[in-house]
Image: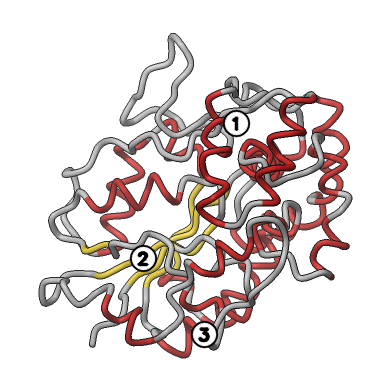
Amino acid sequence: MPMPTFLVIGAPKAGTTALHAALRAHPGLYLSPVKEPKYFLTDGPPPSSGGPGDARTYREHVWRRGDYEALFAAAPPGVPRGESTPFYLYDLDAQRRVHAAVPHARLVVILRDPVERAHSNWTHLWSAGLEPIGDVVRACQEETRRIALGWAHFWHYLSLGRYGEQLAHLFTLFPRDQVLVFRYRDLVDRPADTLDRICAFLGVEQGLLSQVPRENVTAHPASGHGHRLLSSLRRGLPGPLGEPIERLLQRRGRARRPLTWDQRQRLIPHFAEDVELLQRILGEDFGDWLRPRERAGGLIGHRPAGQRQARNGRPRPG
């Protein structure tokens, strides 16, 4: 049975869902019908408990090898086969499992400003009624306690953005020519060029993909009595029973609010040392991640008024 020949391994809230959808449109690639099977996150069954909503997430794991291989059974012979689980980069044990199973696989890594990534991650869980803390800075302060209690990776708002540590470990396992690293901003601002770059890396025809679909754009419900009540109900209902409440919260939400400079200042120190490590590893400048944002964090599929996509334009920070 076939295994994947390439993996989109990270990072969460950095456009992996949109990229998976875009690559599925390429006739020379085969993408798993389950976007995020999470197979390499465990050696067997996933945990049965954790933070709010984690039990449902764990039930989604495709953890049996036969079930995982079946995801690629329909791939035409010789066509590159891939899946997208954005936690493989963060989970060092997952990196080792990937190397043991598919050592020649090509790995795609998307890096997003870690402060913006953490905020988007928090917003996702807040809007779903799962995050009980209505301020991203205070929620980040709970991370160590939550990890100790066994909450799933998606609650690790700060740790997920320490890309330097993650890539340093990855490059002890895989040669650099098997790993493609680029910025989330490249997908937002230069989708055609970025998709061509990915296709070249995967060894398939370029020029066939030009757009990245709008995916995973999260609304932001306002805090208040109504949100507290609905969120309390959401956290108390298992799995599908809570989904109508989650949809109601999304309908009540507004566009995602940008971080304030005060919030950004309080979160940047968590990443400063790791950004320096990342710069040494990749030989690129990521200093913009340690400064105020020049513009609000972009979303896949959204471009501020007056900005147009230029195939050969300069990439913006992100």
Q: Label 2's element? A: strand
Q: Label 1's element? A: helix
| Residue assigned mark 3 | 97
Whether residue 62 sits left or right of residue 235 in the image: it is: left
Q: Residue at x 34, y 62 (%)?
A: 34
- Ranked by sequence position, the earlier of labels 1 and 3 is 3
Image: 92 above or below 196:
below
Residue 33 position, x and y percent, is 28, 62
- Ranked by sequence position, the earlier of labels 1 and 2 is 2
Q: Residues within 10 Å of mark 1 (few under 14, many from 20)?
A: many
Instruction: Assess whether mark 3 and mark 1 are in contact (beta carbons under 8 angstroms).
Output: no
Residue 122 position, x and y percent, is 69, 43
Q: Residues within 10 Å of mark 2 (few under 14, many from 20)?
A: many
Q: Label 3's element? A: helix
Whether residue 3 sits left or right of residue 261 in the image: it is: left
> Hey, what amino acid is under mark 3?
Arg
| Residue assigned mark 2 | 83
| Residue assigned mark 1 | 249
Could you give the CA–CA distance between mark 1 and mark 3, rounded to whole angstroms?
38 Å
Q: Number of numbered discs present?
A: 3
Nearest the eye: 98 or 290? 98
Whether residue 114 sits left or right of residue 309 in the image: it is: right
Image: 255 above or below 32:
above
Whether residue 172 sits left or right of residue 309 in the image: it is: right
Residue 286 makes an appearance in the image = no
